[in-house]
Every structure is written in C-alpha cells, then in structure tokens.
C-alpha cells in the first residue's frame, strides 16, 4: 500500500522552536508523526513541500489532535474583513499562482489561507505574523458582513465629520447641492472661508502639500486647508495598522511610522501604541497605480526590510508590484508629481528617467552631478533639472510657522 508524505515545518517567532510534523495518508486515513527539529533557522526559505504553521508556547507537547485541528484552521487578518481558511493551493482556481495580499509575493506552497468570496490569498507564514493576525472570536464573526475592504473607509465619503469640522455658512451649487463656504475646523482657532485664489508656493496646513483648489483659508493668518483635508474622519481604520486611528493636529514635528519622514500638520494617531502617521501615507490606496511603473502596486508590510527601486533605501512599509520585483517606499510613493521652487515662474514635474541621452546630468540648483538612475524634478520650459531634495528641501513635509 502506497502512502503519501507531506512534511510540515511548524514554528513561531516568539517561542523560537520548530517541529517537524509528517502527515502520512493512506486508505485508512491520516497518521501524524511528530519529530522535533533542532536548530532550524527561523526566517529561512522553506521548500515548497513544507508548510509553516505557528504554535504558541503552550503547545510544546504537540499531539495528533493539535495537528489535525491546524489542518482545518481558520483565522482572521487585519487586512481583510472575512475569515481566511486553510486551503490546498490546487483548490484555488487561478491561471497563475495566487498573490499573497500581505507580502505581495506569489504563493507557491501546497496550502494557503484563502477567502473564496473575495479571492484574497495569504501565505501561511504571513497570516500568522503578529502584526497581521487579528485575534478575535471567529464564532462571533458573521460571514454575512460586507465585502467592502477596510481600506475603503465609508466615513471618507461623508460630507463632514461634525466632531472635526462644523459648517458655518453654505451656498447652493449649480447642481443643486449645498456647498460649505465657511467652516470651523478643529485644527485652527479662526473660521475658514472657501476660496480658489491660489497664493504662490503655499502649502496646505493639513497634508503639507502644495495648495490646490478648492481650499479653505483664514483671512486673519496664513492658514490653508484643502477641502478634502477638512473632510477627513475623526476615527479611521488603516490597512497596515491593527487598531483604529484618531485624527489630531500637531504643530511640532513628528516622525511618521510608515515613511519615516519628519512631518507636522494633521496626523492619525493610535491611542494604544502612540504610533503616528501623516495624512499622505494614510490615504495611500491599498491598490494603486504609479506613473513610474507599468503594473499596479499593493501596500505591503512585512517583517523584513524591502529595498525601494527609486531611492534604494530599505523600509518595512512599501508599495510592491506583484508581477515583478519593483518596490516603492512610502516616501517615494507620496512624492508630489508637481512642485514649485522659490520664485521660479514655472512648475517642476517629477521625472523618472533622464531628460536626454547626453550621459552628463547635473542639478541646476546645487550644480552637482545627478545620478541618472534617481528621480528628479524638471522644468521643461527652461530645461532646468534639479535634485529632488534641492526642489523640496530637507523636510518637505514640515510647514514652518503653522
């Protein structure tokens, strides 16, 4: 009688031990042979014939029952609204290998965690990482809940969050809708009025990006707020964070947990951990298209640093391509497509490849050589190239005297 053996590597980052469980299947059913694996390095590449599963420290004495229960495991991750079920890869009917939506790499193992309703797949190892797995009572989680992703926050579609912004005056638009012409926002002491007259080189006090119409401004001081920033909800769920985040406003500079940049203005803060994010990083879509790359990118947060294809820095929070190895860190993914520099009369556009084939590239501001592989800002009207940092400054996400 032939038997088929499938080896399972069982391990966890917290308890620092691994167990080898060999599942032997025959006509009478399955038998489980448990063997301890000594000094098996955590985080190494596991062969495709092996599956990573997590045991807590209370499962040092592993039994057949535990392994059998794990074979039918269901769990929940923060990135998805529905439970994920341990599923053989052959049951996922796709023309190509499914993509893990947590690390944004192909799933080419024998099993995976999967939601068939939404076609959401995850590596076993990725799903059990502490920053991904959501420990809730799965029996109380109703399967009938909405398939809407947490990244599609319904609160963002509301006109205004009344705890954040109060409407003082309105007018009737051409389409018959009410337009708020004067508001009182929690971030500023004075009332703000709707305007479309854009001052030169002015940044929004909320997202610290160049001001664009429509926006609100204070007639008494230089305070500007995009209309979209005024509508941000007080409480928001973030795809890459386990807890709800609360909107706040901070004049002093802080370090954004996602992009690592120094920022100020509107922030989202976790009340449990104290972690803070700037608005730009929070509003990055779970799936996005970037002008620098031909394929769609997906937000990814793993336990290893990934190298940005633009600046070569290594970060945990990245936007990753599922088709190739292209990666953008949040700092590069949120760079403004258009920027202004001092009194230069034309805007500068972000370029991803050299402006010509001369082979010699210099910055017209600092007059130092530019790396042709690095992104830069360029004024086509004046044939004026410049380093990113020379155009944006050392801390582009900090607005002075806000």
Image: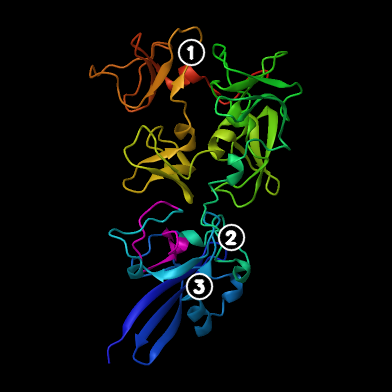
Query: Magenta stretch?
Result: 103-125
- Residue 243 location in percent, x, y? 64, 51
Name the residue carrying label 2.
Answer: 134
Query: Tag 1, which secondary structure?
Result: loop
Residue 108 image-quadrant placement: bottom left
Q: Residues within 10 Å of mark 2 (few under 14, many from 20)?
A: some
Dots 2, 3 in contact, CB < 8 A? no
- Residue 169 location in percent, x, y? 71, 24
Q: Is residue 58 left or right of residue 289?
A: right
Name the residue carrying label 3.
Answer: 73
Q: Is residue 365 left or right of residue 65?
A: left
Name the residue carrying label 1.
Answer: 341
Residue name at image x 27 percent, y 92 percent? 1
294 up-or-down from 9: above or below = above
Query: Tag 3, which secondary structure?
Result: loop
Query: Tag 2, which secondary structure?
Result: loop
- Residue 206 location in percent, x, y? 62, 28
Residue name at image x 37 percent, y 42 percent? 296
Asked if residue 106 can be seen in this view, the reply is: yes
Residue with the most extreme right position = 189
Dots 1, 2 in contact, CB < 8 A? no
Q: Residues within 10 Å of mark 1 (few under 14, many from 20)?
A: some
Sequence-earlier tag: 3 or 1: 3
Which quarter shows the C terminus?
top right
Q: Which mark is residue 364?
A: none
Q: Residues within 10 Å of mark 3 (few under 14, many from 20)?
A: few
Residue name at image x 43 percent, y 84 percent? 33
Sequence-earlier tag: 1 or 2: 2
């Amino acid at each position: 009688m032939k038997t088929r053996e499938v080896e399972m590597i069982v391990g966890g980052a917290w308890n620092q031990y691994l167990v080898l469980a060999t599942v032997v299947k025959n006509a009478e059913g399955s038998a489980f042979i448990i063997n301890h694996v000594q000094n098996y390095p955590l985080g190494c590449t596991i062969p495709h014939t092996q599956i990573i599963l997590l045991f807590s420290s209370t499962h040092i004495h592993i039994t057949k029952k535990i392994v059998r229960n794990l074979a039918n495991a269901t769990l929940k991750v923060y990135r998805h609204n529905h439970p994920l079920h341990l599923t053989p890869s052959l049951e996922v009917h796709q023309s190509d290998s499914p993509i893990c939506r947590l690390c944004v790499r192909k799933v080419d193992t024998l099993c995976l965690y999967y939601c068939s309703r939404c076609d959401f797949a995850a590596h076993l190892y990725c799903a059990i990482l502490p920053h991904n797995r959501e420990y809730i009572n799965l029996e109380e989680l109703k399967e009938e809940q909405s398939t809407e992703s947490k990244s599609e926050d319904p609160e963002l579609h509301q006109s205004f969050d009344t705890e954040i912004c109060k409407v003082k005056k309105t007018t009737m638009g051409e389409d018959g809708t009410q337009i708020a012409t004067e508001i009182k926002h929690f971030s500023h002491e004075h009332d703000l009025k709707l305007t479309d007259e854009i001052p030169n080189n002015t940044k929004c006090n909320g997202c610290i990006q160049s001001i664009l119409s429509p926006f609100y401004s204070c007639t008494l001081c230089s305070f500007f707020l995009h209309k979209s920033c005024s509508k941000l909800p007080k409480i928001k769920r973030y795809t890459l964070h386990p807890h709800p985040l609360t909107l706040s406003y901070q004049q002093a500079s802080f370090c954004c947990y996602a992009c690592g940049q120094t920022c100020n203005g509107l922030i989202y803060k976790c009340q449990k951990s104290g972690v803070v994010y700037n608005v730009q990083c929070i509003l990055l879509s779970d799936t996005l298209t970037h002008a620098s790359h031909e394929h769609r990118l997906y937000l990814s947060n793993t336990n290893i640093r990934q190298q940005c294809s633009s600046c070569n820095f290594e970060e945990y929070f990245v936007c990753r391509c599922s088709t190739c190895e292209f990666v953008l860190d949040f700092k590069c993914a949120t760079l403004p497509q258009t920027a202004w520099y001092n009194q230069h009369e034309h805007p500068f556009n972000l370029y991803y490849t050299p402006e010509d084939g001369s082979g010699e590239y210099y910055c017209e501001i600092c007059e130092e050589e530019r790396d042709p592989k690095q992104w830069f800002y360029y004024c086509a009207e004046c044939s004026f190239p410049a380093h990113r940092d020379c155009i944006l400054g050392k801390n582009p996400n900090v607005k002075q005297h806000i």
